[in-house]
Amino acid sequence: MNAKKVSLKDIALKAGVSTALVSYVLNGKEKETRVGQAIAQKIKEIARELNYQPNHLAKSLRSGKTHTIGLILADISNPFFANIARVVEDEAKKSGYTVIIGSSDEKADKAWDLLNVLITRQVDGFIIVSSEHSEPHIHYLKERNIPFVLLDRHFPDLQTDFVATNNYKASYDAGVHLAKGGYERIGIIAYKTDMYHMRERIRGYKQALQDHKFTFKNNWLKEVQFENIETEVKIAIDEMTSSKDPVDAIIFATYGLAINGLKYINELMLKVPSDLGIVSFGQAEVFDLYYCPITYLKQPLELLGMTAVEFLLKKLKNPEEGVKQILMEATLIARDSSMLKPT
Amino acid sequence: MNAKKVSLKDIALKAGVSTALVSYVLNGKEKETRVGQAIAQKIKEIARELNYQPNHLAKSLRSGKTHTIGLILADISNPFFANIARVVEDEAKKSGYTVIIGSSDEKADKAWDLLNVLITRQVDGFIIVSSEHSEPHIHYLKERNIPFVLLDRHFPDLQTDFVATNNYKASYDAGVHLAKGGYERIGIIAYKTDMYHMRERIRGYKQALQDHKFTFKNNWLKEVQFENIETEVKIAIDEMTSSKDPVDAIIFATYGLAINGLKYINELMLKVPSDLGIVSFGQAEVFDLYYCPITYLKQPLELLGMTAVEFLLKKLKNPEEGVKQILMEATLIARDSSMLKPT
């Protein structure tokens, strides 16, 4: 910002009054000084003329409250997070809070930069969709008593507030649903990550197989790297469909995996649901508009976002508030993509 | 932030040295004071032990540079903007800038709040996707010499830096393409707004009709409200397809309009491209994965985002830099949705 800053002194000089008086008037404290209304009016007009810009930053340094929430997303280009950002903003606005957003692209170092930039900017607290290896950030925030709520992903070994989906149960439901739909060789494509939400999705899937007496084959579980998703999803599908135990159905553990997978399934001219049954996590218009509407696990996006804001605002009001943790249930929305035989 | 802040004095007391010395050491100026390395080391260790957190905010108040860019989006839940945000972040990071994002939901008052929150947070400059009626924001930024670049949307009557798409040409191309594809009664669904980019899309469409000697009917142009998109798109399609001059093709002026339109076209069991030809603005996976792949106007998303960052960084280096304006061309990606007869 390159404009020469107009100071209280500039205004005082022009108005022919003291700097203290200008400060009182511009901070809305003219009553305390018995200053005449005409003078107050004059000071305000001069401030406007000179384009005086109050230094909110210095002000919030003193008050320690900025009514701003930092929202750190793992990936802004994922519609699930983009939509949850909108919910968080709407909900925060109802309580007079503005949300500033950063996206870490699933990279812990970028998340760390953002965290520091926003701490420096004096946000009152954070809502965070964590990326892998970002546990130290949690420790950092806790040590400094900076209020935060984890959203969508959490670390089971760390005692923090969080609002997330019961991913184990959701994935279990997907497996059971495909088994009931007539599929017997069900695979899953997930991300290669230690993140708990992803481990839970794999665990739920395996449990569903076990409960249906299907013997899990190593070839049915593929873990691909986020950075290399397009190529690796193709390889995964090739391997899953061409082995001696080819899958007849695939669970996609995220929206991004599903999009890439469906494009490749089209290229291969595999028909959904007859050649391959599909259930996906995430939600997006594409699941409605695909030639064979896709069965998906609908996460309570609105409720997740709203509850995260609620938890954070409670914490801001009362820092001694106890730890709040919620796992919400996803709903399986059954469509044509997961029915091999009519049940 | 509720932690008792550790001050330089706390460290000085514990180290048994002066506060000034602590300040010198922690600001990396120990050479200027001839302080022994052992003492410097001790001071740094104590600072670490006590979790001393330097006040970056006060520091950036002095230096006037924060290496932070504010990105204001019109709608974060629109994948076009979410993806452009990712490009802007990546590009800014290459030059050591962090991006903080806000979304205005197409509302000028929300954009105004965000602008002020981010100015208060001392961002060095802005990249802005403007919402309707936000011209006063532009004047405000200009008066204060706050550097900014408009992205994707601009105001032709205001002299500002901008990076946008040639919307007139893109829409003209869509009309011509549909005419060549055999359609003769081409309609357009746009937003009801005075925003220039939308007026240009309508103007280009009309010009294409005129150049093909098609007489434009009022019923072929529908303008719906952003807040009421789902209902109004349905009404628009009902009216366009059931009048005495029913359309045989529709141009959707945005991605959001297309998604809502395609859902309703499916409900009505209208077949694309035989009952209705389709061309859409925006880009999204859904256009690839729809049963009939959708012809769309591919905006140079990466180039738009990268150029906006480039313009802003130039301005930050040299505030006297002249005004930079670029209109980039969209590319029509022809698919099955716009071919009634083979050409």
Image (tube, coloured by chain):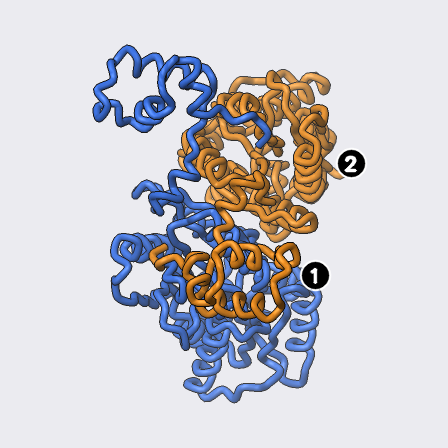
Chain colours: A orange, B blue
- Total residue callouts: 2
Q: Give the camera-side residue of A266 and B143.
A: B143
Rendered position, A71 above or below B243: above
| Mark 2 Cα-neighbour bin, 10 Å: few <14, some 14–19, many ≥20 | few
Amino acid carrying label 2: it is Thr
Image location (x, y in percent) of residue A119: 49, 35
CA–CA distance between discs 2 and 1? 25 Å
**Which residue is disc 1 drawn over?**
B267
Image location (x, y in percent) of residue A83: 60, 47
The chain carrying label 1 is: B
Amino acid carrying label 1: it is Glu
Rendered position, A106 above or below A97: above
Quarter of the figure with the C terminus of chain A: top right
Q: Give the camera-side residue of B141 and A2.
A: A2
The chain carrying label 2 is: A
Helix, strand or loop under label 1? helix
Image location (x, y in percent) of residue B32: 22, 26
Rendered position, B33 above or below A230: above
**Which residue is disc 2 drawn over?**
A343
| Identity of the residue drawn at 42% across and 19% down | B11
Helix, strand or loop under label 2? loop
Q: Residue furthest right?
A: A343
Q: Give the camera-side residue of B101 and A289.
A: B101
Between circles 2 and 1, the one closer to the viewer is 1
| Mark 1 Cα-neighbour bin, 10 Å: few <14, some 14–19, many ≥20 | few
Quarter of the figure with the N terminus of chain A: bottom left
Q: From this viewpoint, is residue A255 visible?
A: no
